[in-house]
Image (cartoon, grey):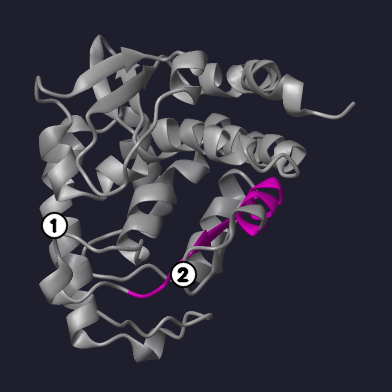
Amino acid sequence: MQHNKPTVQDYSTYTPEDFYVWQLLYERQLPFVQASASELYLAALDKIGFNAAEIPHFEETTKRLQHHTGWQLTVVPELVPQKEFFEMLTRKTFPATCWLRALEELDYIEEPDMFHDVFGHVPLLVNSAYAGFMQNFGKLAMKWIDTPEAIPVLARVYWFTIEFGLLHENGKNKIFGAGIISSIGETQHVFKDESQKVPFNIRQMLTTEYRIDTLQPTYFVIDSFEQLCNAIPDIDKQLEQIFSTQLIH
């Protein structure tokens, strides 16, 4: 389905269907999120001030992010190129779409819309350890940007943490990845026995391929966001080991 993809958020252009879709998605996800998401995500959702009745105002959301971690939101019409995306992360800027899927696309949409980008990704940017990892991940990616074959490998770390990561919290695996938090299918699938839960392992993450068009067969479990932050030098080192023969010194 074709969507109008604005480059600025003009709140007056949202239709009754847009508000209805946001409310439906929000109210449908919230029970799963409250039951299965990390306490850190739930605390962040509270701080960011989202609710079912109101499509988030990017300006207001940016003010809250700035207050907590100095981050900001910027409107993009669709997925941004990798280099541009990583550069934005280094500048504490998160690119998000401000358009919503149509009612008939409620369960699945091919490209990320505002519900995925904003409900899934944005709340945790109020958490300083998580926000720090995002910025440092951007810096690491920019270091490797001229080794093109390293970027898809590095993208696996983003996929298995920021998009589909689990956090071991109070003796249980909890959700923090935006791809699970914003997806009804993933939230129902993630804790079933047929999906594999793997303790955080950088080498395994870097060598595990993923697909974007199916429910995930494998989820990695971290112990804390600090563990992610501390892993950045090791991720860099592992990339050097994998690609050292291809680097020109």
Query: Does residue 34 appear to the left or right of 3 in the view shown?
Result: left
- Residue 163: % across, % down: 38, 40
Quarter of the image with the C terminus is: top right
Query: Does residue 3 appear to the left or right of 153 in the view shown?
Result: left
Marks 2 and 1: in contact by CB < 8 Å? no
Residue type indicated by callout 1:
Glu
Q: Which residue is mark 2?
A: 78
- Residue 60: % across, % down: 49, 66
- Residue 88: % across, % down: 66, 55
Secondary structure beneath dot 1 equals helix
Magenta stretch: residue 95 in it? yes
Direction front: furthest residue = 245
Range of magenta residues: 84-99
Depicted 159 relative to depicted 91: above or below:
above
**In terms of image quadrants, where is residue 147?**
top right
Q: Which residue is mark 1?
A: 27
- Badge 1 crowding class, 10 Å Cα cut-off, few under 14, some 14 to 19, many 20 or more, is some
- Badge 2 crowding class, 10 Å Cα cut-off, few under 14, some 14 to 19, many 20 or more, is some
Depicted 27 relative to depicted 146: above or below:
below
Query: Does residue 61 appear to the left or right of 52 in the view shown?
Result: right
Q: Residue at x 18, y 38 (%)?
A: 34
Residue type indicated by callout 2:
Glu
- Residue 13: % across, % down: 36, 90
Q: Nearer the viewer, residue 67 or 80?
A: 80
Q: Residue at x 46, y 69 (%)?
A: 78
Query: Does residue 15 appear to the left or right of 159 in the view shown?
Result: left
Direction right: furthest residue = 249
Q: Mark 2 or mark 1, which is nearer the start of the sequence?
A: 1
Q: Residue at x 19, y 86 (%)?
A: 16
User: Closer to the camera: disc 1 or disc 2?
Assistant: 2
Depicted 205 relative to depicted 188: above or below:
above
Q: Residue at x 11, y 74 (%)?
A: 104
